[in-house]
Amino acid sequence: MNSMSYLDVHRKFSEEIDMEVAAALSQLGTSSRTTRNAVAALLRHRQLKHPLTVLPLLVHAAETGNPRPALPLSAIHLLWWTSACYMDDLADGHSTEIPGELSENEALLSSVVTGNTLPIQIIQSQRIPESVRGALTTELANSWTIAADGQMEDMRGDIGSATRKSVVETYRGKSGAPFGMITAMAAILSGAPDERIALWREFGYVFGILWQLFNDQEDILSGRNEDLLNGTVTYLLACAAEDAPLPARAHILSLCAAAGGSRAARAELAEILRGPALLRRYREDIDGFRDEAHRILCRLGGDATHLRVLQHLVDHAAQMLLQAELVPVGAASGTY
């Protein structure tokens, strides 16, 4: 048990999480057969690469020693991210139809039901004690609002005015809010007092920043450089622009302006982002977020076995994937 990983937890509970999702789908009823089938198609098509649906299980187990009561929250987490990832692709201008199953508009409607209606139905089900349903609904609503705000800030991002601080604030919204939501939900369900709920929520926010940094690196390692193609102001790009002397900064800004339509500009920018000095500073910043997540976990304490899994998960998210001297092209990338 001492060497248990978050993947071990997922293997143990994945079938039960799927059953929770299937039960939520069944609540749509026979009169909503078309919607139910459309949501099922979206879930099949948008399977998540990294099984972080275990996060509420680990938080609940850290509080109580028992992960299983949080299974409905794992289903909510999966549904939320399935919807959010679809909408993110839509915002980036990617093709979002599901050929042979759903048009783009049908998939969009399905994503709304997936991320909103089904989570509310789960919260209102008999699986969740009535005493906490109101608080869980509030967390869900707040998360969507804060994450949407962060996503819009991301879409409006301007490398010319971006700083480390401004990008971190954006990341706290678009990625931190959903993790803060689900960790706070698990704490609420466990019966934790308000001060511990607040700490678990903050842990989720910091973890979300780490996970966004992890995803940013995976995009570069993939060789596709979709963030550069889409004009996304990542933390690493903001570091490069903020640290560069004026002539180099002007060149970076010109490359960013051209990157959407120029493969050569994207390739040159990607090379700049692999600079040894920049990556050393980037590594230090990642370590800072990792250390903050660990400090929060230390303050929280709890069941030792599951706390260790959370600590290992933080370390996994805080990996420095980019290396200045060796950058594989074509490696698997992934969204959450």
Image: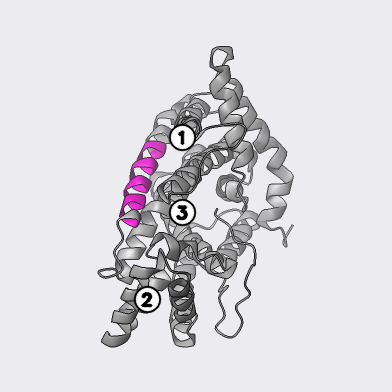
Magenta highlight: main SS: helix
Label 3, label 1: how many angstroms apart (C-alpha)?
27 Å
Where residue 98 appears, as percent x and y from the top left, is: 57, 37
Residue 175 quadrant: bottom left
**Residue 155: percent from left, percent from top:** 34, 54
- CA separation in Å, label 2 and label 3: 24 Å
Q: Earlier in the sequence, mark 3 or mark 1?
A: 1
Q: Which residue is mark 2?
A: 239
Q: Residue at the spot x=50%, y=45% of the render? A: 95
Amino acid type of the residue that numbered disc 3 sits on in the rendered structure: Gly
Q: Which residues are magenta?
A: 139-154
Disc number placed over residue 108 in the picture, else none: 1
Mark 2 element type: helix
- Mark 1: give few (<14), some (14-19) or many (20+) Cα within 10 Å: many
Question: Is any atom of residue 245 visible in this view?
Answer: no
Give the SS element for disc 1.
helix
Which amino acid lies under the numbered mark 2 shown in the image of this protein? Cys
Query: Pointer 3: what residue?
Result: 204
Local secondary structure at mark 3: helix
